[in-house]
Image (cartoon, coloured by chain):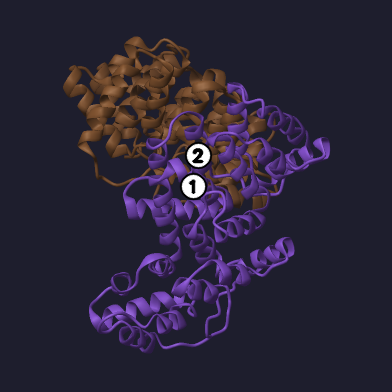
Chain colours: A purple, B brown
Amino acid sequence: MATLIAPAKHSPNEDAEALRRAMEGWGADEKAIIAILGHRNSYQRQKIRNAYEKLYQEDLIKRLESKLSGHFERAVYRLMLEPTDRDAVLANVAIRNIKTDYNVVVEFACVSSPEELLILRRAYHNRYKRSMEEDVAANTTGHLRQLLVGLVSSFRYDGDEINARLAETEADILHDALKDKKENREEVIRILTTRSKAQRVATFNRYRDVHGTSITKKWLDEASNEFHKALHTAISCIDDYKKYFEKLLRNAILKRVGEDEDAVTRVVVTRAERDLKEIKDLYYKRNRVFTEQDVSKELYGNYKKFILTLLGKEN
Amino acid sequence: MATLIAPAKHSPNEDAEALRRAMEGWGADEKAIIAILGHRNSYQRQKIRNAYEKLYQEDLIKRLESKLSGHFERAVYRLMLEPTDRDAVLANVAIRNIKTDYNVVVEFACVSSPEELLILRRAYHNRYKRSMEEDVAANTTGHLRQLLVGLVSSFRYDGDEINARLAETEADILHDALKDKKENREEVIRILTTRSKAQRVATFNRYRDVHGTSITKKWLDEASNEFHKALHTAISCIDDYKKYFEKLLRNAILKRVGEDEDAVTRVVVTRAERDLKEIKDLYYKRNRVFTEQDVSKELYGNYKKFILTLLGKEN
């Protein structure tokens, strides 16, 4: 369920005019901007952007960028993009910084359904005139390349059929993979990049049954290099991506393990109109603290207010 | 241009009835079957199949299979399938025999446009409840796996933009690749599996300018193992797939270099409603003999008659 609260009706022209007023003269009325853009769904925001362009012969996004700054500006910019185009932008940013952000690439590839990933790849073509796998491959080498290119290139079968015997043999392969020989890596890449979601989940369940611990936990404890970390992210996203986002959000709000506001923005903006409610529920269940409490304590200024609004706080 | 000659109008019911008559009792009237099915386009054939099912509560394809035999039966079966479904079947046959037929997998991946390849991958999902890349990966290892999986998984950018400097550096990489070190292979795989068609063609042109010979010729002379041969097929299909089909057809009709009737059937059936005319023109230009002459000399029986009909021979 979404957390973003949007009115059933709104006037794109009135919103555009109010935004114009909020950005006239020196500085900007951030409170007014948050009150409008933080309470419109993606369809409504595109309508406002169009109305603004018509009224003022100016791109609303460009105006916002010139008037706002810091994390707040970046979050507003990301929110304002049409969702598929936004995913392409976020994926591209991660690919350009792949040495640190390879996990974000894994996240996009493994959270998306096969059809969603295709839509993202098409949007990437449109914006960058190159393919996603092309840019990933040009910026990586070795097994990490093989894994990432395989994940972003996959068009998995999306049905429920599973092969139980295959799950058994491939659970063993994943178990051996922590020994990290070359052949093991190749086989792990094959399983994670090509098997259907249902088949992979069956394999992870089999792993849990045999080894008494989840494969994500096992890998997390032993992950020692980029390749292992990327695998861990892939397995977490496939196994239960809401749980993955919950952990990521918590780490990012508390700025743990290299995460920061960009990750907060990414999770909140990309999930606010989809399943952020369930992610927040998991957050509370796991940490016994509301997401909003952590945000209030750890983030600052207009950025904090904007994130709280997207999390569903009523004005 | 197509070679298959179909009437502007036909009656699916009358065709179904005529086919029924041709398959009643012992044996079959192959001449009548060829006269009908060899002269209907794919849309008309599906109409006939539907009409037959309605009239006789029986699948026309199954009836044909039970009544015909050998290469003729296989060719009729392949022709009768809906074209996308047929490609999925042909790809699956090649994947199951990948040790000898890896080139067919390369062919499907490299001749298809990005959107056509997606359609094929969807058809494969529908028929086999697995993904193409999944089956390719499960049946191969090492660099051949990397190359084949990369080729079938790609969703290339389809625009005309090229980067000339990139073409220069990557032509050098391809040149070094014949030295066949591990790193070279990884880079060749990257270039061939991810770059757009326009970019790859620019790279091949650059290669020709610098080295005075086409990369396909160079590779053909030096290809010494499966990986090199698969690369050669990929480059040939990208560079000029009609030329590729012309050579394949000639080798297959003359049963050279391991090719056989299956390849004749594949080329003729899959191209008869697309561009077999141009392929035949190239055939004559190159060999100074008409495709039909070679077919008449080298093939036999009803299979020969059927192939000649698909090649455009009037009854």
Judging from the image, what secondary structure is the residue with disc 2 in?
Answer: helix
Q: In this view, does A239 lie above or below B286?
A: below
Q: Nearer the viewer, residue B133 or B279?
A: B133
Q: Position of residue B113 (x, y in %)?
A: 38, 42
Q: Nearer the viewer, residue A42 or B231?
A: A42
Q: Is residue A245 above or below residue B164?
A: below
Mark 1 / mark 2, whichever is N-terminal: 1
**Rendered image: mark on residue A302:** none
Q: In this view, does A208 lie to the left or right of A292?
A: right
Instruction: Please report, as a chain letter, where disc 2 is located.
Output: A
Disc 1, disc 2: CB below 8 Å? yes
Q: Position of residue B54 (x, y in %)?
A: 65, 53
Q: Position of residue A58 (x, y in %)?
A: 25, 76
Q: Is residue B82 visible in this depiction of the protein?
A: no
Q: Which amino acid does label 1 sit on?
A: Val
Q: Is residue B115 visible in this depiction of the protein?
A: yes
Judging from the image, what secondary structure is the residue with disc 1 in?
Answer: helix
Pointer 1: residues within 10 angstroms few (<14), some, or many (20+)? Answer: many
Q: In this view, does A10 lie to the left or right of A126?
A: right
Q: In which quarter of the image is residue A184?
A: top right
Quarter of the image with the C terminus of chain B is top left
Q: In which quarter of the image is residue B162?
A: top left
Q: Where is residue A271 in the image (x, y as percent from the top left)?
A: 55, 64
**Rendered image: mark on residue A148:** 2
Q: Which of B67 and A184 is in front in this view?
A: A184
Residue ID at (47%, 34%): A145
Disc 1: which residue: A105
Question: Residues at marks 1 and 2, common chain?
Answer: yes
Q: Quadrant of residue B21?
A: top right
Report, in whole angstroms, how far the alpha carbon at label 1 lies from the one at label 2: 7 Å
Residue ID at (37%, 34%): B314
